[in-house]
Image: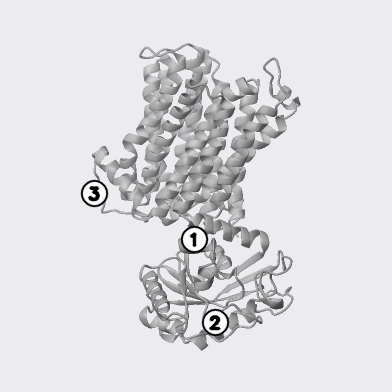
Amino acid sequence: MTHTKGLLRQKRFGPFFGTQALGAFNDNVFKNALAMLITFQGVAVLGMGPTELVPFAGGVFILPFFLFSALAGQFADKYEKSALIRRVKLFEIGVMSLAAIGFWLQSPLVLMLVLFLMGTQSAFFGPLKYGIIPQILEKHELVQGNGFVSMATFVAILIGTLFGGWLMDGSSSGLAMVSVAVILVAVLGYGVSRGIPAVAVADPELKLNWNIFTQTVKTMGYVRENPVVFRSILGASWFWFFGATILGLIPNYTRISLQGSNEVATLLLALFSVGVGVGSLACHWLSARSVEIGLVPLGALGLTLFGADLYFATQALQPTTELVGAAGFLDRDGSFRIMLDVVLMGAFGGVYFVPLNALIQHRSRPDRRSRVLAGGNVLNALLMVISALYTIVLLKVGVSIPEILLLTAVLNAVVATYIFLLVPEFLLRFAAWVLVNTIYRVEVSDLHRIPEEGPALLVCNHVSFVDALVIGGSVSRPVRFVMYYKIFDWPVLRWIFRTAKAIPIASARENQQMMDQAFDAIKRELEAGELVCIFPEGAISRDGEVQVFRRGVEKILAGSPVPVVPMALSGLWGSFFSRSDGGAFRGPMRRFLGRIHLAVGDPVDPGQVTADGLRDRVLELMDSSAPTDLTGAAGG
């Protein structure tokens, strides 16, 4: 296993991690120093006072994402990414030098130009940042790498904001210290970036389209090419809406609803950032080093539950007659519940967001990955603008801040449900993840033998009613399962099986037409490059032994000669879901937390496959990998 310290210390990841963390830190040092200058020195620009100027500055920073993301995505796909990152960091040094001039002159117009240029830099850095991750990391490291990036981003936002406010005291010395700091950090960031390794160019033959409007339309078309990637990007953009809403409300929520000072607001921001960091890093452990999208519904559930509870916790908070600092807030009854809600919102936000990012990187076409990520940046920016408008409108019509928090939590449940219904794979993977991580202890051997892409036929012994869930929850790619039609037609579960694109089958004696349709469907799925899993015994074992394999597997391969991967399940015989002791689903939950083993064999050339030979391979896998702490037959 790759340990946390090991990945950060490796030259292929450490310099990249340091570069992006320093960039996020520097952005927020400048932005908070500018906000302090506007707020406390009464700066006016274009007839706007401090109240209007702060949100206007936010718009100035976001505008480049709409204008330049499409161009940035093209650059990242056409040219070598590490060299581009260094050029972006050189550009940052120039921008921060201009910021120093703006602070020295105390010129709001110059500082607004700097803010626009910073947004431009971020727009170009985004596709490079997320586009290079899958090129410098292995697939099993994607979740951990994205967890580090998300953790570092939120922590850098917090520390940069605090540091910028601490340096900026409104005096000339404060302005000078901010100026020196942002230039030094930019220079340090460039120095660290020189250690980022070179990677392969995604699409060197790409012809650049300099028309930002037509290219943006084209880029959004790339985003929509893969439905799972597109809806994952929508889900990730929703997180930015949710996070922007919560973080934007915290200062006034603290002052008005909690009667707390800036110390309390800072405490809550810190707790949220720490929560995101913990949740982001926890994804690596929860996902067992794979891109586990089953965690996304878990994250969405936590965001809704703790977002809603924050409303009720606020209502239950002991009132006070004056603003209190952090110490006074901690002494109040109910403060711990509020802090816990904020931490857990952040943690579940990390659990929600990190697997989505990893999935987008993993399933995007490599030659268009950066353009797809650039399109995601456009949607992220749009959702953040909508978040600001949403908050402003609700406040204008008299909705209280705690009520906005509650409404946002409810909206999160609605949006998440909509996305999960559009892409049922999320919910199916969640059900599988719960099964293999809570009810049983599942160990998998040699999962790498299943092809990363392209068609293959998976063949496994049939032990219980949850075999498909165990296999589906262990294999990172979507699997099309062939199942007995009477199980496929179970009430309620029928919708789940249909949305998972399971293939119902009957014997020729029962329904010849259905059998023929099943073989046609298997052929179509294999031709489309999918994984198809069959249980050649034709029925769930009644005695824990592996039954004779039927010849259907040979018929499938005659029409679709694809690699065959034998697999063996051990440890489910005797469980609640097996037919031991007379039948499944009878009596108490048996073998709860029992150890299950899924062993994967070497792929077999289709020309060498026979039903009997496959059964022998499955038996060999069972003999070599069956858990030793089982009761009853090891094979079942």
Task: Judge whether 225 appears above or below 53 on screen.
Answer: below
Q: Amino acid at mark 1?
A: Trp
Q: Amino acid at mark 2?
A: Glu
Mark 2 and mark 1: Cα distance apart in space:
25 Å
Q: Is residue 550 left or right of residue 6?
A: left
Q: How is the image coloured?
A: one colour
What residue does disc 2 label? 537
Q: Is residue 151 left or right of residue 211?
A: right
Within 10 Å of disc 1 (Cα), the crowding (few <14, some 14-19, many 20+) is: few
Q: Amino acid at mark 3?
A: Lys
Say if residue 94 shows up in the picture: no
Q: Which mark is residue 495?
A: 1
Closer to the camera: disc 3 or disc 2? 2
Q: Is residue 322 left or right of residue 308?
A: right
Q: Earlier in the sequence, mark 3 or mark 1?
A: 3
In percent of width and height, residue 568 lies at: 58, 76
Q: Secondary structure at mark 2?
A: loop
Q: Secondary structure at mark 1?
A: helix
Mark 3 and mark 1: Cα distance apart in space:
45 Å
Residue situated in front as seen by the camera: 213 or 301: 301
Residue at the (50%, 23%) spot, across then down: 395
